[in-house]
Image: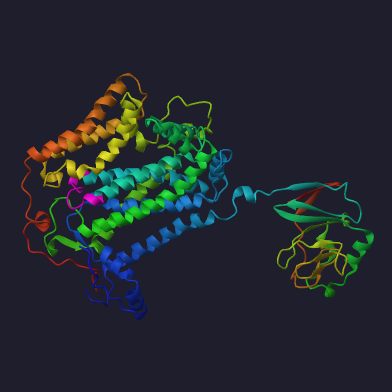
Amino acid sequence: MSGPSNFQPKSPILQWTERRLPILGLMHSSFVAYPTPRNLNYWWTFGGILSFCLGVQIITGIVLAMHYTPTVAGAFDSVEHIMRDVNFGWLLRYVHANGASMFFIAVYIHIFRGLYYGSYKEPREILWILGVIIFLLMMATAFMGYVLPWGQMSFWGATVITNLFSAIPGVGPKIVELLWGGYSVDQPTLQRFFSLHYLLPFMIAGVVVLHIWALHEVGQNNPAGIDVKSDKDTVPFTPYATAKDNFAMVCFMIFFAWFVFYIPNYLGHADNYIPANPLQTPTHIVPEWYFLPFYAILRAIPSKLGGVLAMFGSIALLAFLPWLDRAKTRSAKYRPLFKQFFWVFVICCIGLGWLGAKPAEGGYVIASRILTAYYFIHFLVILPLLSYYEKPSPLPGSISESVLGNQPLAPAKVKGAR
Amino acid sequence: MNGEQPTRRDFLYIATGAVGAVGAAAAAWPLIHQMNPDASVQALASTEVDLTPVAEGQIITVKWRGKPVFIAHRTKKEIETAQQTPLRDLPDPQPDDVRVKKGKEQWLVLVGVCTHLGCVPLGHQGDYNGFFCPCHGSHYDTSGRIRKGPAPSNLEVPPYEFASDTMVRIG
């Protein structure tokens, strides 16, 4: 898919640079000439949207760090200082906080797109696993970021989640002390979380580079799930995918802006506007919405260690997906049974998310256990069985055939007058 | 599509680019402006100073907005010298009476930062019995005006008011 570029710059200065560091050629072959399947739908725009989100979070984060005080005494007040005194501080804070939620909305859509269309299957296994790694890094980053305002939820969320590691037999409590830098969540914890919260997004950026590299090596998947067979199946990335991605990004920005300007605290928790009190736990500790499904799984298992293993396992399981689902047909479009189970799985995840916000009592616990069991059954039982027993629908001959029928192909126009 | 007439596509590209550029500028401005002094810094930090312990001939230094401010209780001789200096002798001409408050000419309030490169001048020193900046040799007189040396302008007079005969509020 990506090979030596035939990009030749016209200006002599650029030719001089190209010979020494072919970065323009790389940009050209990756984002201009890059052959993109012509049947990609809007679910494929979320990769670009995610890159945009990462950029927004890094930029607003760096700028917020110019005004934030990472001390137990000063953190909460410094956030209010940002909101009230710093020029456009309110905007920067709301963009960063809501940006995190937007980042997760986009990543979940991106992941479910991969699940539906079989984008994790051969030859994209490593691409998929890199994605799981990015997801894990995102969760760590978001968790630490939420601690920084040092509100009640910040403090108690940090306490609960770091305490998870005490479930490890033997060394558990020592590990927790190591994480805390003390005997409870306190100044050392806050400060190291600040440092790591600043660091991790750059690691995410690095893994994203690998992710895009792995993608360009094998090429995009597509809604039909069949391989690109000829040039007729693809169009150059610019202007087609570029324009589509930009349009989708603008629509996403409108959605994002709606939250930032009209309902900036909707996705947050009111208790986090109460300064952290180590001597009083709020009645209902809830993590941010994007962690709720995993929180539900954690609480569903009656054993402490079991709950921790189930929670981490539910994410780690994703990495094995290419080997659990070995069906040759990629796209759910041509797998009618798989398609139904996919939507049941989506409802299961949404259900787990809803349950994660509920108190761990009565019917909610029972429901959480049923849905947690189903979550694992989906990956460990249903998908492997489907790969053996499902008879897929007939696939189209080629991508261009599925989009154009068998009409003669008009050449892809690039930039009118040129 | 000949190259002579701009096409509809060209128009759309240029229009999108223009809106994009405006959007980029609108997005960039808050990111830059957040580095400007924020409201808490700008909040006119007022400092009140009690003048009763300041004897005639004495100069005290107080801190205002992070900078030193000299408050000099001038002697009659210092006031006369300042008022009688011909303006043509001054590199930055300013009569003494615009640098003090009417009826309170004995009180000289100056920002103690040399207008050359920012060092803090020393009081009761220099060739004009005013202030002397040791960094590069600027001499200021008993009204804080530059007389000799590389400093381009007189020592700045900050905004201040007399809350009473013995209390001055700076800023």
Work out whether residue B56 can be spotted. Answer: yes
Residue shown at 18%/53% (left/top)?
Answer: A123
Left or right placement of residue B154 versus residue A46 in this view: right
Q: Residue furthest bottom?
A: A12
Residue placed most toward the observer, B169 or A149: A149
| Most distant residue in the top direction | A362
On the rendered image, what quadrant is the C terminus of chain A found in? bottom left
Query: At 52% across and 48% down in the image, what residue appears?
Result: A89
The quarter of the picture where residue A351 lies is top left
Q: Is residue A249 visible?
A: no
Give residue A217's position: percent from left, percent from top.
22, 59
Q: Position of residue A319 (x, y in %)?
A: 25, 43
Q: Position of residue A38 (x, y in %)?
A: 17, 58
In the rendered image, the residue lying farthest to the right is B77
Residue A278, placed above or below residue B33: above
Check residue A116 for magenta coloring. Answer: yes
What range is drawn magenta here? A115-127
Q: In the image, what residue occupies the spot 37% across and 42% down? A: A139
Q: Quadrant of the N terminus of chain A?
A: bottom left
Residue B30 located within the stretch drawn in magenta = no
Q: Which image quadrant for residue A231?
A: bottom left
Please indicate whether residue A286 sits to the left or right of residue A243 in the image: right
Left or right of A59? Residue B108 is: right
How many marks do you count on the picture? 0
Q: How is the image coloured?
A: rainbow
Residue at figure coordinates x 29%, y 43% from the top left:
A108
* Residue A391 % position (x, y): 6, 41
